[in-house]
Amino acid sequence: MITLTCECCNISEDFIDLEKAFDKGWDAPPHFTGYICCNLCPAAFITMGQKYKHIPIHEKWDKEGRPLEFSQETCVPLEDQASEEEMNKLQKFLEGFMEEPWDVEVK
């Protein structure tokens, strides 16, 4: 059992292992960055040194409650939200990126 604490909003959650945390949407090593972020805090704000941009979102959660799942509207500042066209391009990229099999030779 491990306990992870989000480096953005400081919420903690227990997991059996890091794979279970990843499956639940947490960014944690060995996946993604060396930072630990919950399923509601985009790691990009921490990796780019812009954690301050997410503080107003946390303040909103304090007043209205934490959302149950991630969405741009509830978890990303308005000025950083992607357009529908950008989201569609990203979705297509990710679908292609996640296709199996990966024919990569590791040396």
Image: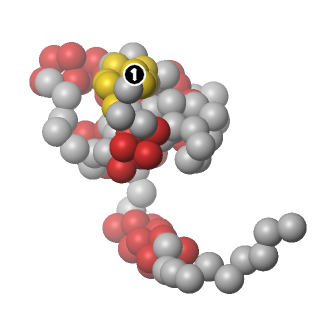
Of residues 65 and 104, the one drawn nearer to the viewer in this rendering: 104
Residue 71, placed above or below residue 91: above
**Extreme residue toward the left, this view:** 64
Q: Residue at x 44, y 77 (%)?
A: 95
The answer to whether residue 79 is left or right of residue 62 is: right
Q: Is residue 85 visible to the viewer in this orientation of the structure?
A: no
Q: Position of residue 27 (x, y in %)?
A: 48, 40
Horizontally, is 6 left or right of 31 in the view?
left
Tag 1: residue type? Thr
- Residue positioned 34% across, 32% down in the render: 15
Residue 105: quadrant of the picture = bottom right
Q: Say which residue label 1 marks.
A: 3
Q: Residue at x 52, y 25 (%)?
A: 51
Give the class, few, some or many, for how many residues have Cα within 10 Å of label 1's Cα (few <14, many ≥20).
few
x%, y% of residue 72? Answer: 31, 48
Residue at image position (68%, 83%) is 103
- Front one among 104 and 64: 104
